[in-house]
Amino acid sequence: MRISVFGTGYLGATHAAGMAELGHEVIGVDIDPDKIERLKRGEVPFYEPGLPELLQKHVESGRLRFTTDPAEAAEFADVHFIGVGTPQKKGENAADMRFVDAVIDTLAPLLTRPAVILGKSTVPVGTAARLAARVRELAPVGDDAQLGWNPEFLREGFAVEDTLRPDRLVIGIDKDRPGRIEEVAREVYADAISRDTPFLVTDLPTAELVKVSANAFLATKISFINAIAEVCEAAGADVLELADAIGHDERIGRKFLGAGLGFGGGCLPKDIRAFMARAGELGVDQALTFLREVDDVNMRRRSHMIQLVERELDGELKGRRVAVLGAAFKPESDDIRDSPALDIAGRLHLSGADVRVFDPQGMDNAAKVWPTLSFAESAADAVTGAEVIVVATEWKEFRELDPYGVADLAARKVIIDGRNCLPTERWIEAGWRYLGMGRHAS
Ligand code: UDX
C-alpha cells in the first residue's frame, strides 16, 4: 500500500520504517527540515535500538522516503497516519492538540481522491469524531476522505518490535459511516493479522479510551507498588520480595510492579493528566480522582530520593559530591521528557549539591534542558569522588557495575538504588551501604 506518516518522532519514524518493513511504500512527513534531512540520509535523530538498521535498509531500498511537503504525501499515499505529539499544555493538565489539528487542516484540503486517515496519536476522547467531521468538510473529495483511530501502544526501547509484532490492533471507526476504514486497516496490518494478532474494531471514542485507559492502568500499577514501598519502608518490610510474592497471582502479575523512582517519559505522566482533564470536561471528574493520587505517589518518589540523599549526607547537600547514574526516563532510550532521573539530578543541583550526571544515551538531550548541570564522561568519571551514588535509570551498564572497582573511585561507599536493579548482596559484600526503594537499608 502507499502510506504516509505525519510526524517523525519516536512514534512516527518507527511506524514509517515499520510499515516499509511490512512491504508498503512509505513517505514520512515532518515540519522540521533538519529532522527530515537526517532521516533522508538514513539517520535516526534519537536513540531507538534496531531503528537505524531498519531505516537505512528501507531508505536504500527506496521503499521509504521523507519530505517536508504535505502535498507530496497527499499526492503519493492512499492511507495517511497521524503520529504527531500531543504534549501537555503549559500550565494545565489538558493535552495540546495543536499539532494534530494542524496536520488535519493541512492534509484534508489536499485530498482530491478517496483516502483513509488513521490517527495514532494519543488524544482526548471525542477528538476523532471532531476530526472526522473536519476532514469531510475540508477535503475536496468530501465523504470519500475517511478518518479512523488506530491507537499506538509501542514502548520506547522496544518500538521496532512493538510496531512489527504488536500484541493487539485496535481500529476505531464511526459505526454510522464505516466506509473503507476496516478493510484498509486489515490490508495495512495483514502481516500481524495472519499471525492471529487480536484485531479489535470499535467505535471512535472506545478506541481513543483504550489507549488512555491502558496507560492509566500501567501508571496505577506502578504507583500502587510505590505506595506499598512507602509502607514497606515505614514497617521495615521489603517491597521486592512482596512484589515477587503478589506477582505469582496470575490476576495480579509481576510486570509493572517495579518499585523505584516511578514513571516518567513522554506518555504516562501527561496521559493521566490529560485523561483527568477530559473527564472533568465530560462531567465525570470523580471517576478519575484516583489518578491524582497516582500522580502524587509518583511525584513523591522523587522527593523521597532527595530526602534519602540528604539524610546520607547528614542534612547538608551544599557542595557535596553526588553521582547520578541515569538521565533518560528509562533504559534503552535517550528520552528525558519528564524523566525522574533528570528531575532528581536537577533538584539536587538546585539544592547546592555538586552533582555529576552520566547517561549512556541521554546526555545531549539532558544538557539542552539542564545546561548548568555537570555531565561526566563515563560512569567511572561520575562516581569519582562521590559521597553518594544514585542509580536513577536501570541501564545494563549500571546494573553490571563492579562494586569493588567503584569503591576505589568513590569518596564514600554509599549507593542508593533508585530502581531496585542492583545485585544487592554483591554490593553489601563489597562493603557498601546499600539503600533500595521500599527496602531496608543494609
Ligand atoms: C508507555 C506504555 O508502556 C506504552 O504502551 C505507550 O504506548 C506509551 O507509554 P513508555 O513511555 O515507552 O511506554 O515506557 P514504559 O516502558 O511503559 O515505562 C514508563 C515509565 O514507567 C518509565 O519511567 C519506567 O521506568 C517506569 N516503570 C515501568 C516503573 O517505574 N516501574 C515498572 O515496573 C515499570
Image: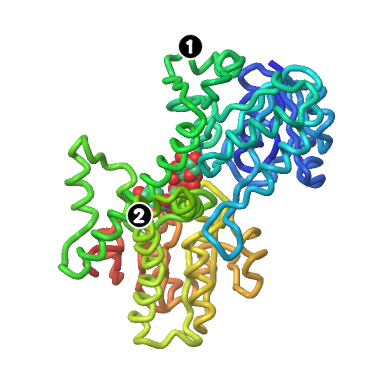
Q: Is residue 424 left or right of residue 194?
A: left
Q: Amino acid at mark 1?
A: Ser
Tag 2 near tag 1, CB within 8 Å: no
The label on residue 248 is none
The image quadrant where one finds the N terminus is top right
Q: Is mark 2 within 8 Å of ligand 1?
A: no
> Which residue is located at x 63 percent, y 24 percent?
19
Q: Quadrant of residue 110?
A: top right
> Residue 293, relative to residue 124: is it above or below?
below
Query: Could you say whether the residue bearing mark 2 is in a helix, strand or loop?
Result: helix
- Number of labelled discs? 2
What x and y, as percent, mark residue 437?
30, 63
> Which residue is located at x 41 percent, y 67 percent?
302
Is tag 2's residue or tag 1's residue first in the polypeptide sequence?
1
* Mark 2 burial class by Cα count in 10 Å: few <14, some 14-19, many 20+: few
> Which residue is located at x 66 percent, y 71 percent?
371
For disc 1, the marked residue is: 194
Query: Could you say whether the residue bearing mark 1 is in a helix, strand or loop?
Result: helix
What x and y, as percent, mark residue 71?
84, 30
> Residue 70, relative to residue 320: is it above or below?
above
Marks 2 and 1, how far apart in space?
42 Å
Q: Amino acid at mark 2?
A: Gln
Q: Is residue 396 visible?
A: no
For disc 2, the marked residue is: 286
> Residue 159, relative to residue 382: is it above or below?
above
Q: Is residue 143 left or right of residue 343?
A: right
What x and y, as percent, mark residue 183?
57, 13
* Mark 1 burial class by Cα count in 10 Å: few <14, some 14-19, many 20+: few
Q: Indicate which label's residue lies in the foreground, 2 or 1.
A: 2
The image quadrant where one finds the C terminus is bottom left
> Which residue is located at x 77 percent, y 21 percent?
141
